[in-house]
Amino acid sequence: MLTESCVSTHDLQGERRVALVRDTAAHYFNLDVNLGGAEPAAVAAHIRIARGALAGVMEVNTSWSVVERNRARARAAPSNNLLVYLIKQGGSRFENAKGEQFVTAAGSVVVGSQDAVYKGVAADGRDWGFHALSVPEHLFALSAPRIQHGGFQLVQPQTSMNGLLASYLNSLNQELPRLDAPAAAAALRALDQLLAAALADAAAPEELAGVVAQQRLSLALQYIDSHLDSPRLTPAAIALAQNISLRQLHRAFEGVGHSVSDAIRGQRIERARTLMLAHPQMSITDIALRCGFDSLATFYRQFKSRFGMTASAMRHAARD
C-alpha cells in the first residue's frame, strides 16, 4: 500500500527551519548536519517520502550542508536497510570509512547503508537534489555483499553499466511505490542485478573474484536450506537455479573446506537431528523423508557417521 508524506521548511521561520533539517537528517538518514553557520532564512529543505509495499523512495531538495555519520551513529543505525542515491542536482565531495574520497555530480549513483560511516560536503554554493531508495538488505542478495564490503561508495561513472543503472533508477523511483509486492520484488531483483554488475565492473579482478564467489556461496546455502525436503536437491539443481555452471558452483565452495554435496548432507543431517529432538512424537521415517533422504538406509548410515550413534540411540539418550 502506498503511503506518502512531505517534510518542508516552506512555512517555517527562524530556528524552526534549522531544527527541521537536522531532525529530518537524523530520522530518515541517520546523519548529523552541519549548516556552516548559515542564516536560518537561508536553510531550506523539501523532502517527499513515498513508501510502497517493499521499499521507500525519498525525493530530497535541500540547501548547502555538511552531513556526517560517525561511528557512534553507525552503531545506532535504526535498520539494516541499504540506500541507493541518484543525484539529480548539484553534487558533493564525500569520504567513506576507508578514507576513499569521491566527487558526485548530477547523474551519479551512490550506494551505502544506514550503518555506513561517511562524510559528505555539498559543492560550494550549490543546493542538493537527489532521490534516495531505501531497501531491506535481504532483497539485494547479489549486490548487498559488495555494498557492505565497499562501504559508502560511488558507482564509477566510467563503468559500462552506470548509464543503464542511472536510467533504470530514474524510472524505478517514480514507479516503485505504486507497485504491489510481487511487482516490486521483480523490479528490485532487476535493480539488484544491475547494481551487482555495475559494482563488479568497478572492482579489481582479484577483489571481484572473491566477492562473486562469496555471493554464489551465500545464495547456494540459502537454496539448500529452503529445498532440503526435496530428494532432487543436487549440485546440478543448485547451479541451474543460480544460472551458473556446475564448475563455477564447485569453485565457490573451495574456500570453505567441503563440497556442495557435503553441505547438502550436513544440513540434512543437522535438520533431522533438530526435528528428532524437538518433536519426539514424529517417527524417524517421517523425519528422514521430510529432510529429503531417499532411503532409510542412507539416513541411518549418514546419521551414525555424523554423530557416532544411531538416531534411535540419540533419541533415547535425550529422553533419559
Image: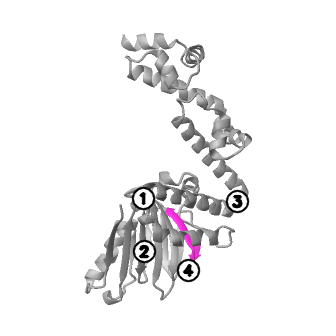
Amino acid bearing label 3: Ala
Residue 221 is situated, as x and y percent measured from the top left of the image, at 57, 39
For mark 2, does the 10 Å Cα neighbourhood hold few (<14), some (14 to 19), or many (20 or more) residues? many
Determine contact: label 1, label 3, CB under 8 Å: no
Q: Which residues are magenta?
A: 101-112
For mark 3, does the 10 Å Cα neighbourhood hold few (<14), some (14 to 19), or many (20 or more) residues? few
Q: Which residue is tagged 1?
A: 180
CA separation in Å, label 3 and label 4: 26 Å
Residue 195 is situated, as x and y percent measured from the top left of the image, at 59, 61
Q: Which residue is tagged 2?
A: 59
Judge whether residue 270 is colored magenta: no
One can see residue 75 in this view:
yes
Seen in the image, is 21 located left or right of residue 87? left
Q: Which residue is tagged 3?
A: 204
Observer-side mark, 1 or 3, equals 1
Is residue 115 or residue 139 the one in the foreground? Answer: 139
For mark 1, does the 10 Å Cα neighbourhood hold few (<14), some (14 to 19), or many (20 or more) residues? some
Amino acid bearing label 2: Glu
